[in-house]
Structures are given as structure tokens and as C-alpha cells.
Amino acid sequence: MPDTYTYKVRDRRGTLITGEIVGESQDLVLAKLREQHYIPLEVKAKSGGLKREFHILPQKAKLKDLAVFSRQFATMVNSGLPLLRTLSILEDQTESKYLGKIVGEMRLDVEKGVSLSAAMAKHPRAFNDLYVSMIRAGEASGTLDSVLLRLADNVEREVSLRRQIKSAMTYPIVVVVLVFLILTAMLLFVVPTFKDLYAQLGGTLPLPTRLLIALSDAVKSYFIFFILGIIVLAFLLRRWKNSEKGRLTWDRFKLRVPIFGPLFHKTAMARFARTLSVLNRSGVPILQSLDIVQETVSNAVVANAVKDLQAGVKEGESLATPLSRHPVFPAMVVQMMAVGEETGALDTMLEKVAIFYDEEVTAAVESLTSLIEPVMIAVVGGAVGAIVIALYLPTFKIFELIQ
């Protein structure tokens, strides 16, 4: 188990430098510091005491941190830096402490003779199957430098794709939450005031007003149970979505939902094409590539189609034939893959498909942003307006209510 060591060293200019470093032993830490051209003065294990990190949920490397790491890794390896030196630099300069700790453990494994891909495979919460398989293929073919560049490009595009999806979804989610809070506040505090006023006036209130007051009474009396019910429903929905059948049903619904459905579909196609293109170009075997695509495409409907594609390939079918049986794959994607197989340029054709759908996602996000804004304004205005109208309906018959 790696420990944290504090050190005092001098650089070539004689400047005193202090810091902390993670290592398996004091000897390995000394060797690493000398490798960085430092003159060690003091190295000792850091006293842990009661200072420990606790994490309620399992930690996971953020994709944006992984994107920066991948680009720096690719740049340094392509510049001719030795692998151990590269990992040592990345361990020190990576902003994410969690990822930096993982890189330190990887460096120690590589120092012991473990391959880079095997060292990465020990940390699935940072490096998924796609990442590990591409590194393994790069090591086997002696093209690790070019594979790292493709990985960096792929991770950066995935970060960009997620950012676009997040920007499209953030506005409506914020508006829905805001509407919920406004309506709850009105039902808890505003409506009861009008209820007391109308009770003093007497008479029969209009139906919309009576319904609103009844809803206010229910929310006020059972507010805690109402909140608990929402939490339980959210938990059950999440659990259902994590089941195989629930995930398939939910992902099928996402593809069919108005407005957002086309965006989810284009996103899935972009991920499918880009992932398969990168794996194919890196020399990963096709059956293994399809296994990885099923895990990374993030949609159960598309994953099932890829599973069928994998079964067809095992039986000797072309890639395009099984996909043509699944409506989720547009004719353009199927035909582009067919042409790619015939010409021996499958990776190029898939990359063109990925670029096309990346541009489509960008256009869809821009279109949704301009469309959703007036729709959300109408939703907020309609919800608040309906309550206001229901509250003020009795004033139109105010003289009838007074006894």
C-alpha cells in the first residue's frame, strides 16, 4: 500500500524545495526524486495521525480531468519522454488528487514491470474498458504514442458532447424546480390567507377556488409525507432504471420523447460511430470492440442492436447487415458502414459519421435552447397564472358572498 512521504531536496541551482510524494517505500521515493534531478536531503514517512479522508460514495475520476490527463500524457509520450518520467510528472501536476494518486500507483506498478494497460486496468473507476483496450492495442503494435493522441481526442470530444447535452437539459430542469418551489410556497403561505378571508365572507366559492384550497390544505397537512413520497419515488425510479428491463424501457422512452428524443438519438449515434472508429483504427479486434461499444454507447436500445451485430459478425455476416434490421440506426449510418467495409476504410467512414452527428448535436442544442426558453416562460406563467385566477375568481362575485 503506497504511503505519503515528505521530502526536502535541492535542485540543480541549489534551491531548497519541500513537498509530499506518494511511494511504496523510502528507497523508491529517493530513486524517483533523483530521477527528477533533485538532490535529496530528507525523506520521511508522513505521520497519518487522525487525519484521514472519508468518502460516502465511491470516488470516480471526472471526465474533464481525464481529458486533461490524456492530452498531457499523449503530448509527453509523443515528445519522446520515457514512460516512467512521464507518469512521475503527471502524478505531481495532475490537479485531481484522486487521479494523481491513481497515476502514482500506476507508476509504481510500471516500475515493477507491469504493463501500462494492466496498471490502468486496476483502476476501472478512472480508466474504462475503451481506454484500457486502446492502450493494450497500442502497446502490442508499438504505436502507443499515436493511440494516446486518439484517446485524448476521443475523451475531449466526449467532454464536449456531455457539455452540450448538459447545457440543453439544465435550463428546463432549473425552470421545473423553480416552478415547483413557487407553487409550493403559494400553496403553503398565500392560499391559506385567501382561505381565511373567504371563510369570513361566507357563501359558495367557485369550483377552481375550492379545488385550489383543498390542494393547499392537503399539501399543508401532509407536506412531510409529500416530500418523503417524492424521495421514495425517485429512489424506486432510479432502482428500476438500473435494472436491465427498466433501462431498456427508459432508453426507448428517451428516444421517443418529443423535442429531446432526436437529441438523445443523435448523441447515441455519435458515441457509437466515434468509439467504433477509434477502436478499429487502434487495432482492437472487432468482437472486442463491439463489446466495448455496448458499454460506452449509453443507450440500451443501441446496445442491444450492437449485441445483435456482434452475433451476426460471429456467424460471418457483414457489419451493415444486422444493423439494417434495427430502426434505431438510420439508413445513412448503415450505408456508410457498408461502403467502409467494401473499400477497407471502415474507420474513416465511421469517423465521418461521428463528425456529422457531433455537428447535428451542436445544431440541435442551439435549436432547443431557442425553442425551450419561450416554452418554459409559458409554463411558468401558466402555472402561476392559473393559481392567481383561481384565487381572484370569488372577487367577481364579492357582493354575492357578503351576507
Image: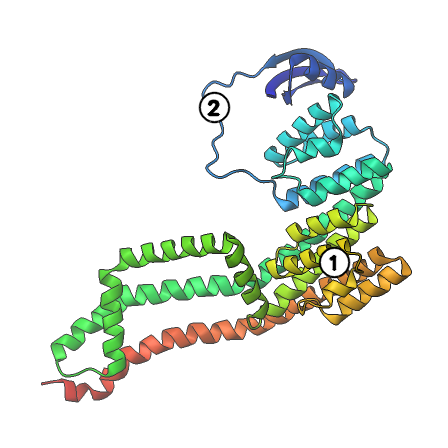
The N terminus lies in quadrant: top right
Q: Is residue 326 above or below residue 288?
A: below
The x, y position of residue 385, in whole percent, is 37, 77
Q: Secondary structure at mark 1?
A: helix
Q: Is residue 259 above or below residue 298?
A: below
Q: Which residue is painted at 17% across and 74% down in the image? A: 197
Of badges 1 and 2, nearer the viewer stands: 1
Q: Which residue is painted at 78% across and 63% down in the image? A: 320
Q: Which residue is mark 1?
A: 312
Apparent side of residue 303 relative to residue 117 in the rendered image (left or right): left
Q: Which residue is mark 2?
A: 51
Which image quarter: residue 368? bottom right
Q: Separation of disc 1 and disc 2 at Cα?
A: 55 Å
Apparent side of residue 59 relative to residue 65 in the rendered image (left or right): left
Which image quarter: residue 11? top right
Amino acid carrying mark 2 in the image: Lys
Q: Which residue is painted at 76% across and 23% down in the image? A: 113
The x, y position of residue 353, in whole percent, is 77, 63
Q: Secondary structure at mark 2?
A: loop
Instruction: Please tell me which residue lies in front, 153 or 302.
Output: 302
Apparent side of residue 200 relative to residue 351 in the rendered image (left or right): left
Label 1, residues with CA under 10 Å away: few <14, some 14-19, many ≥20? some
Query: Can residue 92 be spotted in the picture?
Result: no
